Image: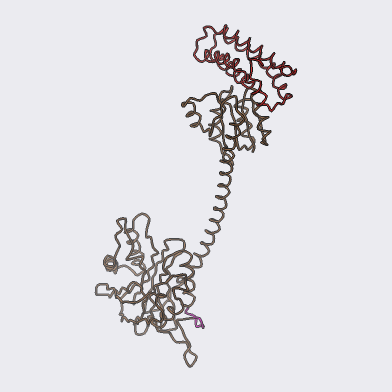
Chain colours: A brown, B red
Protein backbone atom coordinates (compact mmCIF):
# COMPACT_ATOMS: atom_id res chain seq x y z
CA UNK A 1 0.00 0.00 0.00
CA UNK A 2 1.13 3.52 -0.66
CA UNK A 3 1.18 5.24 2.73
CA UNK A 4 1.65 8.92 3.48
CA UNK A 5 2.76 9.77 6.99
CA UNK A 6 2.54 13.25 8.48
CA UNK A 7 4.55 13.77 11.65
CA UNK A 8 6.48 16.84 12.74
CA UNK A 9 8.72 15.03 15.23
CA UNK A 10 11.36 13.39 13.09
CA UNK A 11 12.10 10.58 15.53
CA UNK A 12 8.47 9.54 15.60
CA UNK A 13 8.32 9.98 11.84
CA UNK A 14 11.44 7.88 11.29
CA UNK A 15 10.22 5.12 13.58
CA UNK A 16 6.85 5.01 11.91
CA UNK A 17 8.37 5.02 8.45
CA UNK A 18 10.83 2.27 9.32
CA UNK A 19 8.06 0.11 10.72
CA UNK A 20 5.74 0.59 7.77
CA UNK A 21 8.52 -0.09 5.27
CA UNK A 22 9.44 -3.22 7.17
CA UNK A 23 5.88 -4.42 6.55
CA UNK A 24 6.28 -3.80 2.86
CA UNK A 25 4.47 -0.49 2.46
CA UNK A 26 5.59 2.19 0.08
CA UNK A 27 6.00 5.13 2.46
CA UNK A 28 6.29 8.85 1.85
CA UNK A 29 7.00 10.99 4.93
CA UNK A 30 5.88 14.59 5.38
CA UNK A 31 7.25 16.91 8.07
CA UNK A 32 3.95 18.60 8.90
CA UNK A 33 0.34 18.92 7.74
CA UNK A 34 1.06 21.41 4.98
CA UNK A 35 3.88 19.30 3.57
CA UNK A 36 1.59 16.26 3.77
CA UNK A 37 -1.20 18.09 1.92
CA UNK A 38 1.20 19.08 -0.87
CA UNK A 39 2.51 15.52 -1.16
CA UNK A 40 -1.04 14.15 -1.04
CA UNK A 41 -2.11 16.34 -3.95
CA UNK A 42 0.90 15.30 -6.02
CA UNK A 43 0.34 11.54 -5.80
CA UNK A 44 -2.21 8.85 -4.95
CA UNK A 45 -2.22 7.31 -1.49
CA UNK A 46 -4.39 4.55 -0.04
CA UNK A 47 -3.56 5.20 3.60
CA UNK A 48 -2.61 8.35 5.49
CA UNK A 49 -1.20 8.13 9.00
CA UNK A 50 -1.10 11.59 10.50
CA UNK A 51 -0.17 13.16 13.82
CA UNK A 52 -2.97 15.27 15.28
CA UNK A 53 -0.97 18.24 16.60
CA UNK A 54 1.42 19.66 14.07
CA UNK A 55 2.61 23.15 13.17
CA UNK A 56 1.42 24.82 9.92
CA UNK A 57 -1.55 22.49 9.45
CA UNK A 58 -2.81 20.06 12.03
CA UNK A 59 -4.04 16.54 11.41
CA UNK A 60 -7.72 17.52 11.60
CA UNK A 61 -7.34 20.16 8.92
CA UNK A 62 -5.38 17.69 6.78
CA UNK A 63 -8.14 15.05 7.06
CA UNK A 64 -10.83 17.60 6.17
CA UNK A 65 -8.90 18.59 3.05
CA UNK A 66 -8.38 14.96 2.07
CA UNK A 67 -12.10 14.26 2.43
CA UNK A 68 -13.04 17.30 0.36
CA UNK A 69 -10.63 16.37 -2.41
CA UNK A 70 -11.42 14.20 -5.40
CA UNK A 71 -9.50 10.95 -5.02
CA UNK A 72 -9.38 7.96 -7.34
CA UNK A 73 -10.22 5.59 -4.52
CA UNK A 74 -11.01 5.69 -0.84
CA UNK A 75 -8.24 7.02 1.40
CA UNK A 76 -8.08 5.43 4.85
CA UNK A 77 -6.92 7.92 7.47
CA UNK A 78 -5.48 7.03 10.85
CA UNK A 79 -4.85 9.85 13.31
CA UNK A 80 -1.97 9.49 15.74
CA UNK A 81 -2.91 11.04 19.03
CA UNK A 82 -2.46 10.99 22.72
CA UNK A 83 -6.06 12.18 22.90
CA UNK A 84 -8.52 9.57 23.98
CA UNK A 85 -11.38 11.70 25.25
CA UNK A 86 -14.77 11.02 23.67
CA UNK A 87 -15.01 14.63 22.43
CA UNK A 88 -11.66 14.34 20.65
CA UNK A 89 -12.68 11.09 18.99
CA UNK A 90 -15.89 12.77 17.78
CA UNK A 91 -13.96 15.76 16.40
CA UNK A 92 -11.55 13.42 14.61
CA UNK A 93 -14.25 11.21 13.14
CA UNK A 94 -16.39 14.16 12.09
CA UNK A 95 -13.39 15.56 10.24
CA UNK A 96 -13.19 12.25 8.38
CA UNK A 97 -10.66 10.11 10.28
CA UNK A 98 -11.31 6.38 10.08
CA UNK A 99 -9.29 5.31 13.08
CA UNK A 100 -7.00 6.47 15.87
CA UNK A 101 -3.70 5.24 17.18
CA UNK A 102 -2.19 6.33 20.45
CA UNK A 103 1.33 7.77 20.62
CA UNK A 104 3.93 6.40 20.80
CA UNK A 105 2.50 3.79 18.53
CA UNK A 106 2.43 0.20 19.62
CA UNK A 107 3.53 -2.10 16.80
CA UNK A 108 0.79 -4.65 17.35
CA UNK A 109 -1.88 -2.00 17.45
CA UNK A 110 -0.49 -0.26 14.38
CA UNK A 111 -0.47 -3.56 12.49
CA UNK A 112 -4.12 -4.43 13.21
CA UNK A 113 -5.34 -0.92 12.51
CA UNK A 114 -3.49 -0.89 9.20
CA UNK A 115 -4.98 -4.28 8.36
CA UNK A 116 -8.45 -2.90 9.02
CA UNK A 117 -7.61 -0.03 6.68
CA UNK A 118 -6.30 -2.38 4.01
CA UNK A 119 -9.51 -4.43 4.22
CA UNK A 120 -11.57 -1.30 3.66
CA UNK A 121 -9.36 -0.20 0.76
CA UNK A 122 -9.57 -3.66 -0.87
CA UNK A 123 -13.34 -3.77 -0.43
CA UNK A 124 -13.71 -0.29 -1.84
CA UNK A 125 -11.49 -1.17 -4.81
CA UNK A 126 -13.37 -4.34 -5.53
CA UNK A 127 -16.67 -2.46 -5.21
CA UNK A 128 -15.41 0.24 -7.58
CA UNK A 129 -14.28 -2.44 -10.02
CA UNK A 130 -17.66 -4.16 -9.87
CA UNK A 131 -19.43 -0.84 -10.28
CA UNK A 132 -17.36 -0.14 -13.37
CA UNK A 133 -18.21 -3.60 -14.74
CA UNK A 134 -21.88 -3.05 -13.97
CA UNK A 135 -21.83 0.34 -15.63
CA UNK A 136 -20.22 -1.17 -18.69
CA UNK A 137 -22.77 -4.00 -18.73
CA UNK A 138 -25.54 -1.47 -18.24
CA UNK A 139 -24.25 0.63 -21.14
CA UNK A 140 -24.11 -2.47 -23.33
CA UNK A 141 -27.63 -3.50 -22.34
CA UNK A 142 -28.92 0.02 -22.90
CA UNK A 143 -27.40 -0.02 -26.38
CA UNK A 144 -29.00 -3.41 -27.02
CA UNK A 145 -32.34 -2.19 -25.70
CA UNK A 146 -32.17 0.87 -27.91
CA UNK A 147 -31.41 -1.35 -30.88
CA UNK A 148 -34.27 -3.69 -29.94
CA UNK A 149 -36.62 -0.72 -29.50
CA UNK A 150 -35.73 0.36 -33.04
CA UNK A 151 -36.56 -3.11 -34.31
CA UNK A 152 -39.83 -2.94 -32.43
CA UNK A 153 -40.64 0.45 -33.92
CA UNK A 154 -40.34 -1.20 -37.30
CA UNK A 155 -43.31 -3.42 -36.37
CA UNK A 156 -45.55 -0.37 -36.24
CA UNK A 157 -47.25 1.08 -39.31
CA UNK A 158 -44.60 2.78 -41.44
CA UNK A 159 -47.34 4.39 -43.50
CA UNK A 160 -51.08 4.12 -43.35
CA UNK A 161 -53.09 2.80 -46.29
CA UNK A 162 -54.55 5.63 -48.29
CA UNK A 163 -57.99 4.52 -49.37
CA UNK A 164 -61.01 6.67 -50.14
CA UNK A 165 -63.31 4.61 -47.92
CA UNK A 166 -61.52 4.89 -44.59
CA UNK A 167 -59.07 6.82 -42.43
CA UNK A 168 -56.73 5.33 -39.86
CA UNK A 169 -54.99 6.72 -36.80
CA UNK A 170 -52.91 5.05 -34.13
CA UNK A 171 -50.91 5.63 -30.99
CA UNK A 172 -48.31 3.48 -29.31
CA UNK A 173 -46.70 4.24 -25.96
CA UNK A 174 -44.38 1.64 -24.42
CA UNK A 175 -44.11 1.94 -20.62
CA UNK A 176 -40.49 0.66 -20.71
CA UNK A 177 -37.87 0.71 -23.43
CA UNK A 178 -39.48 -2.35 -24.96
CA UNK A 179 -43.17 -3.06 -25.13
CA UNK A 180 -45.30 -6.15 -25.35
CA UNK A 181 -47.83 -4.28 -27.47
CA UNK A 182 -47.72 -4.00 -31.22
CA UNK A 183 -50.19 -3.08 -33.91
CA UNK A 184 -50.46 -2.56 -37.63
CA UNK A 185 -52.71 -1.64 -40.53
CA UNK A 186 -51.92 -3.57 -43.71
CA UNK A 187 -53.25 -3.29 -47.22
CA UNK A 188 -54.30 -6.75 -48.41
CA UNK A 189 -54.89 -6.29 -52.10
CA UNK A 190 -57.30 -3.79 -53.61
CA UNK A 191 -60.35 -4.63 -51.56
CA UNK A 192 -59.16 -5.39 -48.05
CA UNK A 193 -57.25 -3.87 -45.18
CA UNK A 194 -55.94 -6.07 -42.38
CA UNK A 195 -55.89 -4.52 -38.91
CA UNK A 196 -54.52 -5.88 -35.68
CA UNK A 197 -53.64 -4.86 -32.16
CA UNK A 198 -51.81 -7.38 -30.00
CA UNK A 199 -50.49 -7.50 -26.47
CA UNK A 200 -47.85 -10.03 -25.39
CA UNK A 201 -47.98 -10.80 -21.67
CA UNK A 202 -45.44 -8.70 -19.77
CA UNK A 203 -43.05 -6.31 -21.39
CA UNK A 204 -39.31 -6.05 -21.83
CA UNK A 205 -36.99 -8.12 -23.99
CA UNK A 206 -38.83 -11.47 -23.83
CA UNK A 207 -42.18 -9.92 -24.72
CA UNK A 208 -40.69 -7.84 -27.51
CA UNK A 209 -38.86 -10.82 -29.03
CA UNK A 210 -42.15 -12.70 -29.20
CA UNK A 211 -43.84 -9.67 -30.75
CA UNK A 212 -41.17 -9.66 -33.48
CA UNK A 213 -41.80 -13.34 -34.23
CA UNK A 214 -45.55 -12.81 -34.38
CA UNK A 215 -45.37 -9.76 -36.61
CA UNK A 216 -43.16 -11.69 -39.04
CA UNK A 217 -46.04 -13.99 -39.89
CA UNK A 218 -48.55 -11.13 -39.91
CA UNK A 219 -47.05 -9.90 -43.16
CA UNK A 220 -49.14 -8.47 -46.00
CA UNK A 221 -46.62 -9.75 -48.52
CA UNK A 222 -47.78 -12.74 -50.47
CA UNK A 223 -45.16 -15.17 -49.25
CA UNK A 224 -45.26 -18.67 -47.89
CA UNK A 225 -44.73 -17.41 -44.34
CA UNK A 226 -47.68 -15.01 -44.35
CA UNK A 227 -50.70 -16.05 -42.34
CA UNK A 228 -52.79 -13.27 -43.85
CA UNK A 229 -52.61 -14.27 -47.51
CA UNK A 230 -52.68 -17.83 -48.89
CA UNK A 231 -52.53 -19.08 -52.46
CA UNK A 232 -55.73 -20.76 -53.67
CA UNK A 233 -56.01 -23.61 -56.20
CA UNK A 234 -55.45 -21.22 -59.08
CA UNK A 235 -52.31 -19.84 -57.47
CA UNK A 236 -53.89 -16.49 -56.64
CA UNK A 237 -53.54 -15.23 -53.13
CA UNK A 238 -56.71 -14.95 -51.08
CA UNK A 239 -57.24 -13.04 -47.86
CA UNK A 240 -57.35 -15.54 -45.01
CA UNK A 241 -60.37 -15.25 -42.72
CA UNK A 242 -59.54 -13.65 -39.32
CA UNK A 243 -60.70 -16.71 -37.37
CA UNK A 244 -58.29 -18.90 -39.34
CA UNK A 245 -55.43 -16.44 -38.82
CA UNK A 246 -55.89 -16.34 -35.05
CA UNK A 247 -56.30 -20.12 -34.85
CA UNK A 248 -53.05 -20.52 -36.80
CA UNK A 249 -51.31 -18.10 -34.44
CA UNK A 250 -52.57 -20.27 -31.57
CA UNK A 251 -51.06 -23.36 -33.23
CA UNK A 252 -47.72 -21.68 -33.88
CA UNK A 253 -47.23 -19.91 -30.56
CA UNK A 254 -48.15 -22.29 -27.74
CA UNK A 255 -47.25 -20.84 -24.36
CA UNK A 256 -44.89 -23.66 -23.41
CA UNK A 257 -42.76 -22.96 -26.48
CA UNK A 258 -42.76 -19.20 -25.90
CA UNK A 259 -41.16 -18.98 -22.48
CA UNK A 260 -44.59 -19.21 -20.82
CA UNK A 261 -45.72 -16.11 -22.62
CA UNK A 262 -49.05 -15.72 -24.29
CA UNK A 263 -50.69 -12.88 -26.11
CA UNK A 264 -54.06 -11.38 -26.81
CA UNK A 265 -54.90 -10.09 -30.23
CA UNK A 266 -57.73 -8.74 -32.29
CA UNK A 267 -57.22 -9.30 -35.95
CA UNK A 268 -59.80 -8.10 -38.44
CA UNK A 269 -60.22 -7.46 -42.14
CA UNK A 270 -62.04 -4.39 -43.37
CA UNK A 271 -63.77 -4.98 -46.69
CA UNK A 272 -63.56 -1.66 -48.49
CA UNK A 273 -66.49 -2.50 -50.77
CA UNK A 274 -69.03 -3.88 -48.33
CA UNK A 275 -67.68 -1.80 -45.39
CA UNK A 276 -67.90 -4.91 -43.26
CA UNK A 277 -65.26 -5.43 -40.56
CA UNK A 278 -64.83 -9.13 -39.82
CA UNK A 279 -62.63 -9.94 -36.91
CA UNK A 280 -61.60 -12.57 -34.40
CA UNK A 281 -60.46 -11.89 -30.89
CA UNK A 282 -58.16 -13.95 -28.71
CA UNK A 283 -58.71 -12.79 -25.16
CA UNK A 284 -58.40 -9.16 -26.23
CA UNK A 285 -60.38 -6.17 -24.90
CA UNK A 286 -63.55 -5.64 -26.96
CA UNK A 287 -63.72 -3.61 -30.17
CA UNK A 288 -65.43 -0.29 -29.53
CA UNK A 289 -67.74 0.76 -32.32
CA UNK A 290 -68.71 4.42 -32.54
CA UNK A 291 -71.72 4.70 -34.88
CA UNK A 292 -72.08 8.22 -36.20
CA UNK A 293 -75.46 8.75 -34.57
CA UNK A 294 -75.44 6.44 -31.58
CA UNK A 295 -73.44 6.02 -28.42
CA UNK A 296 -70.18 4.03 -28.54
CA UNK A 297 -70.53 0.35 -27.79
CA UNK A 298 -68.00 -2.25 -26.65
CA UNK A 299 -68.61 -5.50 -28.54
CA UNK A 300 -67.85 -8.08 -25.86
CA UNK A 301 -66.78 -11.52 -27.04
CA UNK A 302 -65.55 -14.41 -24.95
CA UNK A 303 -62.33 -16.00 -26.18
CA UNK A 304 -59.02 -17.40 -25.02
CA UNK A 305 -55.67 -15.71 -25.39
CA UNK A 306 -53.29 -17.19 -27.94
CA UNK A 307 -51.07 -19.88 -26.47
CA UNK A 308 -53.25 -21.03 -23.60
CA UNK A 309 -55.09 -24.01 -25.07
CA UNK A 310 -54.17 -25.93 -28.24
CA UNK A 311 -56.58 -26.34 -31.18
CA UNK A 312 -59.05 -23.68 -30.16
CA UNK A 313 -61.47 -22.38 -32.75
CA UNK A 314 -61.78 -18.63 -32.83
CA UNK A 315 -65.21 -17.35 -33.67
CA UNK A 316 -65.50 -14.64 -36.23
CA UNK A 317 -67.61 -11.56 -35.66
CA UNK A 318 -68.72 -8.92 -38.04
CA UNK A 319 -69.68 -5.27 -37.88
CA UNK A 320 -71.41 -3.46 -40.69
CA UNK A 321 -70.19 0.09 -40.92
CA UNK A 322 -71.47 3.18 -42.61
CA UNK A 323 -70.08 6.56 -43.46
CA UNK A 324 -69.10 8.49 -40.33
CA UNK A 325 -68.81 5.39 -38.17
CA UNK A 326 -65.63 4.74 -36.27
CA UNK A 327 -64.21 1.76 -34.45
CA UNK A 328 -61.31 1.39 -32.07
CA UNK A 329 -58.94 -1.46 -31.22
CA UNK A 330 -56.71 -0.99 -28.20
CA UNK A 331 -54.82 -2.85 -25.50
CA UNK A 332 -55.78 -3.23 -21.86
CA UNK A 333 -53.33 -0.43 -21.01
CA UNK A 334 -56.24 1.96 -21.61
CA UNK A 335 -59.16 0.54 -19.59
CA UNK A 336 -56.85 -0.83 -16.89
CA UNK A 337 -54.80 2.36 -16.45
CA UNK A 338 -54.66 3.10 -12.73
CA UNK A 339 -54.74 6.41 -10.97
CA UNK A 340 -52.91 7.12 -7.70
CA UNK A 341 -55.83 5.59 -5.73
CA UNK A 342 -55.39 2.34 -7.69
CA UNK A 343 -58.71 2.95 -9.44
CA UNK A 344 -58.88 1.75 -13.04
CA UNK A 345 -59.80 4.10 -15.86
CA UNK A 346 -62.40 1.46 -16.75
CA UNK A 347 -64.53 0.71 -19.77
CA UNK A 348 -67.35 3.07 -18.82
CA UNK A 349 -65.05 6.08 -18.51
CA UNK A 350 -63.31 5.04 -21.70
CA UNK A 351 -66.60 4.87 -23.65
CA UNK A 352 -67.67 8.24 -22.25
CA UNK A 353 -64.34 9.76 -23.30
CA UNK A 354 -64.61 8.26 -26.78
CA UNK A 355 -68.15 9.60 -27.05
CA UNK A 356 -66.97 13.05 -26.03
CA UNK A 357 -64.24 13.02 -28.69
CA UNK A 358 -66.35 12.06 -31.67
CA UNK A 359 -66.48 15.67 -32.97
CA UNK A 360 -62.70 15.81 -33.17
CA UNK A 361 -60.81 14.56 -36.20
CA UNK A 362 -59.76 10.92 -35.96
CA UNK A 363 -56.11 11.83 -35.32
CA UNK A 364 -57.06 14.42 -32.70
CA UNK A 365 -59.48 12.05 -30.96
CA UNK A 366 -56.78 9.36 -30.64
CA UNK A 367 -54.31 11.87 -29.20
CA UNK A 368 -56.97 13.27 -26.83
CA UNK A 369 -57.95 9.83 -25.55
CA UNK A 370 -54.31 9.00 -24.80
CA UNK A 371 -53.89 12.34 -23.00
CA UNK A 372 -57.01 11.64 -20.96
CA UNK A 373 -55.57 8.25 -19.90
CA UNK A 374 -52.21 9.80 -19.07
CA UNK A 375 -53.80 12.49 -16.97
CA UNK A 376 -55.89 9.82 -15.20
CA UNK A 377 -52.65 8.05 -14.24
CA UNK A 378 -51.06 11.26 -12.93
CA UNK A 379 -47.37 12.17 -12.73
CA UNK A 380 -45.64 8.91 -13.58
CA UNK A 381 -47.96 7.99 -16.45
CA UNK A 382 -49.39 4.58 -17.34
CA UNK A 383 -47.67 1.52 -15.87
CA UNK A 384 -48.52 -0.60 -18.90
CA UNK A 385 -48.03 -0.18 -22.61
CA UNK A 386 -50.81 1.86 -24.22
CA UNK A 387 -51.76 1.10 -27.83
CA UNK A 388 -54.71 2.34 -29.76
CA UNK A 389 -55.79 2.03 -33.36
CA UNK A 390 -58.83 3.84 -34.72
CA UNK A 391 -60.62 3.56 -38.05
CA UNK A 392 -63.17 5.95 -39.50
CA UNK A 393 -65.37 5.20 -42.45
CA UNK A 394 -65.35 8.20 -44.75
CA UNK B 1 18.95 -1.72 34.54
CA UNK B 2 18.07 1.97 34.57
CA UNK B 3 15.02 3.87 35.73
CA UNK B 4 15.04 6.46 32.96
CA UNK B 5 13.77 4.25 30.13
CA UNK B 6 12.35 0.77 29.65
CA UNK B 7 15.18 -0.93 27.81
CA UNK B 8 13.29 -4.10 26.92
CA UNK B 9 10.34 -2.27 25.46
CA UNK B 10 12.62 0.05 23.51
CA UNK B 11 14.66 -2.78 22.01
CA UNK B 12 11.51 -4.64 21.14
CA UNK B 13 10.13 -1.53 19.48
CA UNK B 14 13.16 -1.26 17.19
CA UNK B 15 13.74 -4.99 16.72
CA UNK B 16 17.10 -4.74 18.51
CA UNK B 17 18.40 -2.71 15.61
CA UNK B 18 21.20 -0.83 17.32
CA UNK B 19 22.17 0.99 14.15
CA UNK B 20 18.67 2.39 13.93
CA UNK B 21 18.77 3.23 17.63
CA UNK B 22 21.99 5.13 17.06
CA UNK B 23 20.35 7.08 14.26
CA UNK B 24 17.40 8.07 16.45
CA UNK B 25 19.56 8.91 19.46
CA UNK B 26 21.53 11.27 17.23
CA UNK B 27 18.25 12.89 16.26
CA UNK B 28 17.36 13.20 19.93
CA UNK B 29 20.69 14.85 20.62
CA UNK B 30 20.20 17.23 17.74
CA UNK B 31 16.54 18.11 18.18
CA UNK B 32 16.12 17.73 21.93
CA UNK B 33 18.19 20.74 23.02
CA UNK B 34 16.40 22.93 20.46
CA UNK B 35 13.01 21.96 21.80
CA UNK B 36 14.15 22.40 25.41
CA UNK B 37 15.42 25.86 24.38
CA UNK B 38 12.00 26.64 22.89
CA UNK B 39 10.35 25.51 26.11
CA UNK B 40 12.62 27.73 28.19
CA UNK B 41 12.05 30.75 25.95
CA UNK B 42 8.29 30.20 26.09
CA UNK B 43 8.38 30.05 29.87
CA UNK B 44 10.54 33.17 30.04
CA UNK B 45 8.14 34.97 27.71
CA UNK B 46 5.12 33.58 29.58
CA UNK B 47 3.95 32.26 26.18
CA UNK B 48 1.67 29.43 27.28
CA UNK B 49 0.64 28.42 23.79
CA UNK B 50 4.18 27.95 22.49
CA UNK B 51 5.08 26.16 25.70
CA UNK B 52 2.21 23.70 25.23
CA UNK B 53 3.16 22.96 21.60
CA UNK B 54 6.90 22.60 22.29
CA UNK B 55 6.36 20.43 25.36
CA UNK B 56 3.87 18.31 23.44
CA UNK B 57 6.38 17.74 20.63
CA UNK B 58 9.14 16.97 23.10
CA UNK B 59 6.88 14.54 24.92
CA UNK B 60 6.12 12.70 21.66
CA UNK B 61 9.81 12.55 20.83
CA UNK B 62 11.02 11.04 24.10
CA UNK B 63 8.03 8.70 24.28
CA UNK B 64 9.63 6.80 21.39
CA UNK B 65 12.41 5.75 23.79
CA UNK B 66 9.96 4.32 26.33
CA UNK B 67 11.15 7.01 28.76
CA UNK B 68 8.10 7.35 30.97
CA UNK B 69 9.53 9.73 33.58
CA UNK B 70 10.79 12.15 30.92
CA UNK B 71 7.40 11.93 29.16
CA UNK B 72 5.73 12.69 32.44
CA UNK B 73 7.88 15.79 32.99
CA UNK B 74 7.15 17.06 29.46
CA UNK B 75 3.43 16.40 29.95
CA UNK B 76 3.47 18.46 33.12
CA UNK B 77 4.82 21.42 31.17
CA UNK B 78 2.40 20.82 28.30
CA UNK B 79 -0.52 20.90 30.73
CA UNK B 80 0.81 24.07 32.33
CA UNK B 81 0.93 25.65 28.89
CA UNK B 82 -2.56 24.48 28.01
CA UNK B 83 -3.93 25.67 31.33
CA UNK B 84 -2.15 29.02 30.99
CA UNK B 85 -0.75 28.72 34.50
CA UNK B 86 3.04 28.81 34.36
CA UNK B 87 3.61 28.88 38.11
CA UNK B 88 6.38 26.36 38.85
CA UNK B 89 7.25 26.02 35.17
CA UNK B 90 10.96 26.78 35.68
CA UNK B 91 11.18 24.10 38.34
CA UNK B 92 9.35 21.66 36.12
CA UNK B 93 11.72 22.50 33.26
CA UNK B 94 14.71 21.84 35.52
CA UNK B 95 13.33 18.39 36.27
CA UNK B 96 12.71 17.79 32.56
CA UNK B 97 16.22 18.90 31.62
CA UNK B 98 17.69 16.66 34.25
CA UNK B 99 15.73 13.67 33.04
CA UNK B 100 16.49 14.52 29.41
CA UNK B 101 20.20 14.60 30.19
CA UNK B 102 19.99 11.28 31.99
CA UNK B 103 17.98 9.77 29.15
CA UNK B 104 20.54 10.76 26.52
CA UNK B 105 23.37 9.50 28.68
CA UNK B 106 21.63 6.20 29.37
CA UNK B 107 20.88 5.72 25.67
CA UNK B 108 24.54 6.38 24.82
CA UNK B 109 25.53 3.82 27.44
CA UNK B 110 23.20 1.32 25.81
CA UNK B 111 24.72 2.03 22.40
CA UNK B 112 28.19 1.48 23.85
CA UNK B 113 27.00 -1.92 24.97
CA UNK B 114 26.92 -1.07 28.63
CA UNK B 115 23.20 -0.55 29.01
Q: Is residue B80 left or right of residue A348?
A: right
Point 27% across, 73% down: residue? A297
Who's the residue at 53% across and 59% down the image? A141
Locate the N terminus of chain A and report the quarter of the image it occupies: top right
Can you name the residue that lies furthest to the front here? B1
- Stretch in magenta: A218-225
Asked whether, in this view, residue A125 is left or right of residue A310, the answer is: right
Which of the pair A34/B109 is nearer the observer?
B109
Q: Is residue A266 visible?
A: yes
Q: Quadrant of residue B97?
A: top right
Residue A103 in the image, given as x and y percentages of width and height: 58, 25
Task: Give percent across and percent down for residue A333.
Answer: 36, 65
Q: Is residue B54 magenta?
A: no
Residue A275, quarter of the rendered image:
bottom left
Quadrant position of the C terminus of chain A in the picture: bottom left
Q: Is residue A127 above or below residue A84?
A: below
Q: Is residue A304 above or below residue A32?
A: below
SS majority, magenta: loop
Amino acid sequence: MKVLIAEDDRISRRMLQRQLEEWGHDVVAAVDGRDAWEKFQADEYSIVVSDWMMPEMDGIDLVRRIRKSETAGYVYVILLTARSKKEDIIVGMEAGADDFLSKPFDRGELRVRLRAGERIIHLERSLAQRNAQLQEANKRMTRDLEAAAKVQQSLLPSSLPEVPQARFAWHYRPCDELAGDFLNVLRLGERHVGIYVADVSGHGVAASLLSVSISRVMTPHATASSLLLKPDASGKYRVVAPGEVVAELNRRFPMEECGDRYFTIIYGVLDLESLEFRYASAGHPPVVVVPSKRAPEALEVASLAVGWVPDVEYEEHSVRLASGDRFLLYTDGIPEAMNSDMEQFGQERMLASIDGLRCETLDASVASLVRTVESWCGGTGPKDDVSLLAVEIV
Amino acid sequence: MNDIFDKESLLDRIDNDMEFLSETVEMLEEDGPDLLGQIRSAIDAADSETLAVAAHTYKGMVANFCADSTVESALKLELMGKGGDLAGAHEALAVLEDRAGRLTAALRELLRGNG
